[in-house]
Amino acid sequence: MTLEQLKAELERKEIQLKDILEITQAININSSEESLYTIYRWILQGSLYVGKLALYVFDSTWRCKVFFGTQESPVALDLQHIADLREPTLLEGLPTMDAFFQGFDWVIPILYRDQLLAYIFVEKYAHPNSETHTPINLNFLQTLTNIIIVAIENKKLVRHQLKQELHNKELEIAKRVQSMFIPRRLPATEKLTMRSTYLPHDLIGGDYYDYIQLAEGKFLVCIADVSGKGVPAALLMSNFQATLRMLVRHTYKLKNIVDELNLLIYQNAQGEHFITFFVAIYDTRKNILRYINAGHNPPFLLNKTTGELKSLETGTTVLGFLHNLPFVNEEVIREIDNFLLFCFTDGVPETVNPQDEQFSAERIGSILQNYQYTSLIDLHAHILDKLYRFKQDLGFTDDITMLSCRVKNFELPATNPL
């Protein structure tokens, strides 16, 4: 090698070193992806004298991030002919590709830890020296591209980690919010016993149930289900619960309560969510049960005195879908003092088996009649056991929520008919 050639080679190495330092500095100061690609293009055109190039990067799909020197616009990358490449390869040895790629000579895969990150399509010779046929320095081009792409991939990873941390924080907040509107204790006396079962399908469920002791010997029991899941749904349900508890301080009229709750959801959810809701107030002095069902799965009322099983369907439509509810009907059930009220959300009857059959409300009603004299703990356990047996190896598709309320002013039968 002549002295002139050695000097030229030394000059090229110094330029390459300078380029690497410039890229490294840009990465260290956390430059944007757009800035890194811009610097990358300057180096290719100013130092390597690349006249024609297209860089495809995998970003959910293959996208052309940098291209110049082509008259055609970038097209979708067809991996049929290059999917197995792991080394720089001449395109002329591959089957015919789209016209856009026919202006290039080399395809260079960019890998990191055996993961394919990008493809470079580049011409064979440096543009200013095309007359002397000076080849593009493929090794340096590959190294430079690898530095850029790995740095950008690391940026994506950091962003993903930050998003995941934020998501986890939101989940934690939502779970705390949700725990606040699930009653920690339910009545367990000789005349009033309640039991709940709550199995959220996701980390944050969308179901809500409550018991509120009122004045004048009354109490309120309710169950609700919000459409959608996640933080917004949990926050909406939290607001719903707080508003319900505020309203019952001022009125026991169920129609007024339901109208106000509907307006609250309509204004806050803006059509993105709605809530199904069942609410009942029982007067222990007058033995009167009043209820309104707002589009919720009808609870069952089992009159222990007469043996009648009634589905509580009277009410209105779902809350939050319309500004004003078109109708609100309240049903009053009198002279009832020995009964079982069983409420549930749609995750229970809509549980499916491998034959795509639903568990159904009819099965729930049958279980209630067969196990009406067992404890509420055993009753819930029987239903869960039958749900698990029914679905077999399939998972639950929604939250599983059950709330039972047993009022007893008379002695139970001496023997269990089962």
Image (cartoon, grey):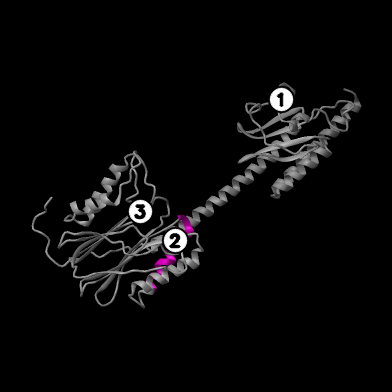
The circle drawn on residue 346 is 3
Question: Is 342 placed above or below 61 here?
Answer: below
Q: Is residue 60 left or right of residue 193?
A: right
Which residue was labeled with disc 2?
274
Q: Is residue 277 left or right of residue 21?
A: left
**Visible residue check, residue 173:** no
Residue 98 point in image, percent of width and height: 72, 30
Answer yes or no: do the residues labelled 1 and 3 have beta carbons within 8 Å? no
Q: Is residue 229 left or right of residue 384?
A: right
52 within the magenta span:
no
Q: Where is residue 285, by image quadrant?
A: bottom left
Question: Is 215 placed above or below 233 here?
Answer: below
Which residue was labeled with disc 1?
96
The circle drawn on residue 111 is none
Which sits in the foreground, 220 or 134? 220
Amino acid type, callout 1: Thr
Between the residue at mark 3 and the residue at mark 2, the CA separation in whole angstroms equals: 14 Å
Between the residue at mark 2 and the residue at mark 1, the CA separation in whole angstroms equals: 55 Å
**Along the polypeptide, which appears first: circle 2 or circle 1?**
1
Amino acid type, callout 2: Phe
Between the residue at mark 1 and the residue at mark 3, the CA separation in whole angstroms equals: 57 Å
Q: Magenta stretch: give its range.
A: 228-246
Q: Dividing the image into 4 quarters, which one contains the N terminus? A: top right
**Along the polypeptide, which appears first: circle 3 or circle 2?**
2
Question: Is 218 placed above or below 185 here?
Answer: below
Element type at marker 2?
loop
